[in-house]
Image (cartoon, rainbow, N blue to C red):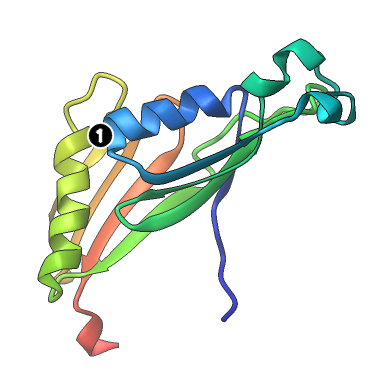
Amino acid sequence: MTQLYPYLAFENTKEALQYYEEVFGATHINRLPVQREQAENFGIDPDKAEESTMHAEFKIADVTLFASDAFDNSEDYTITKGISLLIDYDINDAEDTKRVEALYEKVKDDESITVEMPLADQFWGGKMGAFSDKYNVRWMLHGQDHSKE
């Protein structure tokens, strides 16, 4: 089955993973550091290779995300609000609803989070909320009745 996965580039993915684990409750974290012998290929100091991340996978609210360090310093890898990560959940699925709404409750009061729209019932019958994290990643949570699809 074809899938689309968010793949984020950070200046320091190792640090970002710690942030997402602490603030978002990220799970299933798997980080592949750059090996010393690969450092030259990535344009980094071999003594700092272990701190660099070639690839990482993690889950937030049971959604898989990928990440790596932004190795090409000549490019602008700033994350903008031009793209949002939408976590869509079925409001009829109690486990799904609990998982996503618990994510919102966990992050909403953290000083690194800017809530743009509190997660609340909406006029179209679903729930919606939006916030940005310290890396400027914009998250949208959307609960809807999937039985109507």
The three-letter amino acid code for the residue at tag 1 is Val
In the picture, which quadrant includes the C terminus? bottom left
Closer to us: 140 or 60: 60
The picture quadrant where one finds residue 69 is: top right
Q: Position of residue 129 (x, y in %)?
A: 23, 49
- In this picture, residue 106 sits left or right of residue 30: left
- In this picture, residue 68 sits left or right of residue 40: left
In the picture, which quadrant includes the N terminus? bottom right
Closer to us: 83 or 5: 5
Q: Is residue 99 above or below residue 126?
A: above
Q: Which residue is mark 1?
A: 115
Q: Position of residue 131 (x, y in %)?
A: 31, 38
- In this picture, residue 47 sits left or right of residue 144: right
Closer to us: 33 or 77: 33
The picture quadrant where one finds residue 118 is: top left
Closer to us: 145 or 103: 103
**Residue 94 in view:** yes
**Residue 133 in view:** no
Q: Residue at x 30, y 28 (%)?
A: 22
Report the residue that reaches farthest toward the right: 40
The picture quadrant where one finds residue 8 is: top right
> Would you call the spot at circle 1 few (<14 residues within 10 Å), some (14-19), or many (20 or more)?
some
Report the residue that reaches farthest toward the bottom: 148
Q: Residue at x 29, y 37 (%)?
A: 24
Q: Residue at x 15, y 63 (%)?
A: 97
Q: What element does badge 1 sit on?
A: strand
Q: Is residue 117 above or below residue 125?
A: above
Q: Position of residue 88 (x, y in %)?
A: 32, 64
Q: Residue at x 16, y 27 (%)?
A: 109
- In this picture, residue 146 sits left or right of residue 137: left
Q: Is residue 137 above or below residue 113?
A: below
Q: Position of residue 78 (x, y in %)?
A: 62, 28
